[in-house]
Amino acid sequence: MAVCIGLYITKFETLSNFSMFFLSPIMMISGVFSDVGNYQNIFKYLVYSNPFYWLLCFFRAGFIGGIFKYGSVLTLIIIALVYGLYFYTSILLSHKERQHI
């Protein structure tokens, strides 16, 4: 995510705006400070689509232990997304380098 943000921003102030208006609200509803089971149905679906929620679940499962319900399938999906994002940004960077030549 940081690579994509770095490719998008042109000023340092843009980075702080992104952090304040995008990352902070996402982290607040990710289940760090409250139990997701207490949310209403529409908010549960919103939280379940939040990648920070799944990151938090894996982090907790790693330290506390236990069986994560969708662990192996979700891990494969996350690995595929990370590799896809890596190759997409590498293609963007190589395309930008060709334009500067």
Image: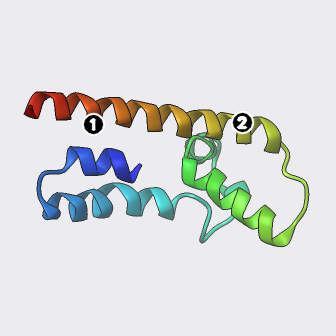
Q: Position of residue 37 (x, y in %)?
A: 73, 55
Quarter of the image for residue 66 reads bottom right
The location of residue 71, given as percent across then percent down, is 80, 45
Label 1: few (<14), some (14–19) or many (≥20) C-alpha neighbours in 10 Å: few
Query: What residue is rendered at 80% in x and 62% in y?
Result: 61
| Residue 95, image x, y percentages | 23, 28
Labelled disc at residue 93 = 1
Left of 98 or right of it: where is 24?
right
Please name whichever residue, 35 or 7, is drawn nearer the observer in this view of the structure: 7
Q: Residue at x 29, y 64 (%)?
A: 20
Query: Of callouts 1 and 2, which one flags the residue occurring earlier in the amino acid sequence?
Result: 2
Between residue 33 and residue 5, name the one nearer to us.
5
Q: Which residue is denoted by mark 2 in the rendering?
A: 76
Q: CA distance from mark 1 to mark 2?
A: 26 Å
Say which element carries label 1: helix
Residue shown at 61% from the left, 33% from the top: 80
Q: Give the quarter of the figure containing the C terminus.
A: top left
Horizontal side, residue 69 vs residue 32: left or right:
right
Whether residue 6 is situated above or below residue 15 in the rendered picture? above
